[in-house]
Image (spheres, rainbow, N blue to C red):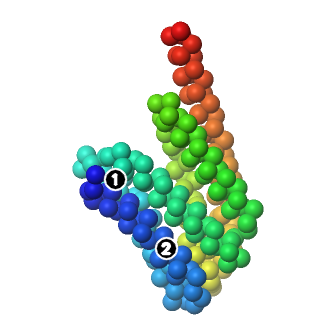
Amino acid sequence: MFNLPNSLTLARVGAVPLIILLMYFPGAFTAWLATLVFVAACITDMLDGMLARRRSQVTSMGKFLDPLADKLLICSVLVMLVHQGRAPAWVVILILGRELAVTGMRAIAAERGLVVAADNFGKLKTVLQIVALVPLIFGRELLGLDLPSIGTFLLYAALVLTVFSGGNYLYNFYVNLLHDQGKEDESV
């Protein structure tokens, strides 16, 4: 179902190739543009959920597309940063591995009719990843601040939270799976 919140989510997906294209070209102007488009895409992430709830326009399509759009946006930028030598590959591999693992667990849970919702650690992880990516996308000094170094430090902090929230998600997934298994055993 198409509505404003879902349209914002689709706009975020559409922004990904533009951000990657802008990051591909060197120069201060394209760095500014890539950073601005990324920030705008991140703002749509806040707006789509808020509008969907406020307007009672929460849809299955939105529930599916929103986390997918988030992962596509963040993971694409991370891969491009590795390609450009602005982010350590091992950090990005760990972050991507966590995202794939959580997506797989969500799929298994959904298949069993279970919902393992994102918790506050997962939400904070996403915010910290975004905050780390902004200076890394910009990739240069600004007002005497070494933004690439700040971004790298924040990316390491995001990695710690990414691994922790992934472990927390795995624990919650396992507990829900055991609880669901217990229900199946009782009904037999």
Residue 96 falls in which quadrant of the image? bottom right
- Depth check: 17 or 155 in front? 17
- Going 69% across and 66% down the picture, which residue do you hit? 153
Asked whether 185 or 94 is in front, the reply is: 185
Residue in view at x 73 percent, y 66 percent: 89
Q: Position of residue 93 (x, y in %)?
A: 70, 59
Q: Residue at x 68, y 75 (%)?
A: 83
Q: Residue furthest left?
A: 55
User: Which one is nearer the viewer's eye here, 97 or 162?
Assistant: 97
Query: Which disc, if any, is residue 99?
Result: none
Q: To which residue does mark 2 refer?
A: 17
> Mark 2 touching mark 1, by CB under 8 A?
no
Quadrant in the rendering for residue 166: top right
Residue type at numbered disc 2: Pro
Mark closest to the chain's N terminus, 2 or 1: 2
Residue at the disc numbered 1: 50
Q: Is residue 150 visible?
A: no
Residue 26 higher or lower than 115, as above or below: below
Q: Residues within 10 Å of mark 1 (few under 14, many from 20)?
A: some
Task: Tell me what residue is drawn at x 31 percent, y 57 percent.
Answer: 5
Mark 2 or mark 1, which is nearer to you? 2
How many marks do you count on the picture?
2
Q: Position of residue 50 (x, y in %)?
A: 34, 53
Q: Residues within 10 Å of mark 2 (few under 14, many from 20)?
A: some
| Mark 2 residue element | helix
What amino acid is labelled 1 in the image?
Met
Q: Position of residue 46 (x, y in %)?
A: 40, 58
Q: Position of residue 176 (x, y in %)?
A: 56, 28
Residue at mark 2 to residue at mark 1: CA–CA distance? 25 Å
